[in-house]
Amino acid sequence: MCVNISGEYCEVKVDQPCPSSWWGYPVCGPCHCDVEKGYNADCNKTTGECYCKVTLVGISYWCSMPL
């Protein structure tokens, strides 16, 4: 059985995206976004930058600077 690999002879590597709240490539690591300060738990999948949560009316919470 192939794990993260496909093909008849397990010859094709299959890239898996990082799970929610994780970032990085080729090795994933956890986002370190402080949800207590208004940041979203998910971060940029490439840079790890945190984002402010947005309300239903499109207004950002009080956090305005990336972590």
Image: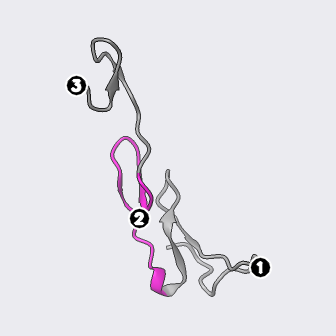
Residue 31 in the magenta stretch? The answer is: yes
Q: How is the image coloured?
A: one colour
Which of marks 1 and 2 precedes in the sequence?
Answer: 2
Q: In this view, does 42 lie to the left or right of 8?
A: right
Distance in Å between CA atoms under marks 2 and 3: 31 Å
Q: Are marks 1 and 3 in contact (CB under 8 Å)?
A: no
Q: What residue type is labelled 1?
A: Val
Q: Residue at x 45, y 73 (%)?
A: 33
Q: Residue at x 64, y 84 (%)?
A: 61
Crowdedness of circle 2 by 10 Å Cα count: few (<14), some, many (20+)? Answer: many
Query: Which one is in front in this view, the residue at disc 2 or the one at disc 1?
Result: 1
Q: In this view, does 5 lie to the left or right of 40?
A: left
Q: Residue 31 carries which label?
A: 2
Which one is in front, 13 or 24? 13
Which of marks 3 and 1 precedes in the sequence?
Answer: 3
Disc 3: which residue: 1
Q: Residue at x 59, y 77 (%)?
A: 65
Q: Which amino acid does label 3 sit on?
A: Met
Classify mark 1: helix, strand or loop.
loop
Residue 30 appears in which quarter of the rendering? bottom left
Q: Which residue lies furthest to the front in this view?
A: 1
Q: Which residue lies furthest to the left in this view?
A: 1
Which of marks 3 and 2 precedes in the sequence?
Answer: 3
Q: Which amino acid does label 2 sit on?
A: Cys
**Residue numbers of the magenta segment:** 19-36
Q: Are marks 2 and 1 in contact (CB under 8 Å)?
A: no
User: Where's residue 29, x and y in %?
Assistant: 34, 56
Residue 55 appears in which quarter of the rendering? bottom right
Disc 1: which residue: 57
User: Where's residue 67, x and y in %?
Assistant: 49, 73
